[in-house]
Structures are given as structure tokens and as C-alpha cells.
């Protein structure tokens, strides 16, 4: 079964859908299809490749139940006027940025729109007057999801990522939410290492595939 993705189709101005379940298929009614193969689903992966899907990397979901508490020095709530500076911090390793079929300006606009949507639940790490990074949170019933987390290139390796995770954990605990989740790319070893050092454990892994109608 293929489900049409209205937001993606409108944003990228292409007919985009997602294959539901573990049986990949294609349709001339779509320009692009996403398929997420579960870890260990050899048959689904092989079938996807036979149909012309292109592997776009692993999706890894992690969870932490040991949240940090207490405010973080140098972290504040984001403001609307921060959007331009936050959007300037790139996400170079995502499946959208890796797929050359997606126009670069539309990929950048995707993340800018996501930041704008979550600006009221975003926390910003500061180094003086400069933004060193940010974490955007989304409450989902009994857990808090990290929708976006990014560190400015010139501030990496200084512990900013850990500070942002601490801030996200405190943000969740203040709202009586005891679980923090995050999703990242399997190829992003630095991010995976950061999450594991701060108490996150892997709970799900799959591989994204994209199909494009030629």
C-alpha cells in the first residue's frame, strides 16, 4: 500500500508517497516513493533494489529514561528573531540533503519551516552573543522527542551537544515527562556516540530507500 504524503508533495512540488508495510512497490501515480526497511528485512531490501529504489542510509531511534535535571548555564529559550541564525546551521547528512533529486533550496526551506514550527519549544546554547547550537523538542503524550538538534560547525567538539541534551532532559522533566527520544542517521557516528554517552539506548533501526520515476 502506498500513502500519499501531502506535505512533502506540496513542499517539493512532486508527487510523493510512502510505501506502508514491508512489501515495497512502485506506482506511476508518484514521482517519488519512500520505503523504510526494518533491520533484518533482507527480502524487503532486495525487493526494493530490484524495483529501482536507492538506499539512502539507516534511520536509528534512541531513547533515554535517565533525564538530566537542573537548568543549564548558557542555554535560553529560542526567540522568533533567532530563526535566521538557527536555519543557517546545516544538516549535511540527512536523506534529503543526500538525495540529488531534491532541490537544495527546498531542503533548506524544509528545515527552516521545521524550526519555525517548533520555535516555542526550542532551546538555544549561547557562546557570548553567538548561537553555538540548538535543540527543538516535541511533546508526544508520555515522551519528549528531539525533533532537531544541531551544533554550529565552529563550535563542535566543545561539549555543546551534551549541554543541549542536558537542557532537553530538563525541559522534559519540568513537564513531568520521563522519556526522551531522538532519531539520527546510522552513518552519523559522532551523534550516535554523543547520545550513547548521555544514556540513550538504541531501540529501533531501519534503512530508508527512495524511488524516483524516470
Image (cartoon, rainbow, N blue to C red):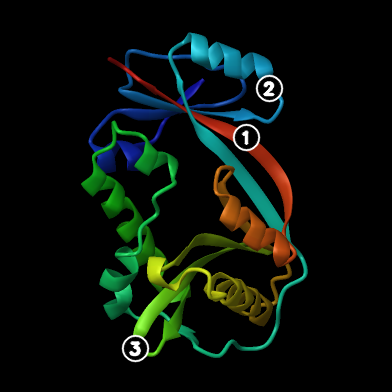
Q: Percent from the top left, x then y, of residue 55?
A: 49, 26
Q: Percent from the top left, x then y, of residue 157?
A: 53, 69
Which numbered disc covers residue 206? 1
Which residue position holds label 2? 41
What's the distance in space between the residues labelled 1 and 2, CA to CA?
9 Å
Residue shown at 52% from the left, 35% from the top: 57
1 and 2 marks in contact (CB < 8 Å):
yes
3 and 2 marks in contact (CB < 8 Å):
no
Asked whether the viewer can see residue 92, the reply is yes
Q: Look at the image and tell me in which quarter the C terminus lies.
A: top left
Residue shown at 55% from the left, 62% from the top: 146
Q: Secondary structure at mark 2?
A: loop
Lower sequence index among marks 1 and 2: 2
Relative side of 98 to 21, left or right: left
The image quadrant of residue 210 is top left
Q: Secondary structure at mark 3?
A: loop
Which numbered disc, 3 or 2, marks the residue closer to the eye? 3
* Label 2: few (<14), some (14–19) or many (≥20) C-alpha neighbours in 10 Å: few
Amino acid at each position: 500500500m502506498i500513502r500519499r504524503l501531502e506535505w512533502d508533495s506540496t513542499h517539493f512540488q512532486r508527487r510523493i508517497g510512502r510505501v506502508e508495510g514491508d512489501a515495497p512497490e512502485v506506482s506511476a501515480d508518484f514521482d517519488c516513493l519512500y520505503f523504510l526497511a526494518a533491520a533484518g528485512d533482507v527480502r524487503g531490501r532486495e525487493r526494493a533494489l530490484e524495483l529501482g529504489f536507492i538506499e539512502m542510509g539507516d534511520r536509528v531511534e534512541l531513547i533515554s529514561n535517565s533525564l538530566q535535571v537542573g537548568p543549564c548555564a548558557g542555554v535560553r529559550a529560542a526567540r522568533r528573531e533567532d530563526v535566521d541564525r538557527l536555519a543557517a546551521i546545516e544538516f549535511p547528512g540527512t536523506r534529503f540533503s543526500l538525495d540529488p533529486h531534491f532541490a537544495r533550496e527546498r531542503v533548506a526551506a524544509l528545515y527552516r519551516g521545521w524550526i519555525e514550527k517548533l520555535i516555542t519549544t526550542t532551546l538555544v546554547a549561547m557562546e557570548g552573543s553567538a548561537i553555538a547550537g540548538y535543540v527543538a523538542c516535541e511533546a508526544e503524550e508520555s515522551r519528549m522527542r528531539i525533533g532537531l538538534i544541531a551544533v554550529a560547525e565552529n563550535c563542535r567538539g566543545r561539549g555543546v551537544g551534551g549541554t543541549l541534551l542536558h537542557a532537553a532532559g530538563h525541559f522534559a522533566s519540568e513537564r513531568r515527562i520521563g522519556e526522551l527520544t531522538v532519531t539520527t542517521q546510522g552513518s552519523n557516528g559522532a551523534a550516535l556516540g554523543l547520545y550513547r554517552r548521555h544514556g540513550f539506548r538504541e531501540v529501533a533501526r531501519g534503512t530508508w530507500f527512495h524511488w524516483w520515476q524516470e
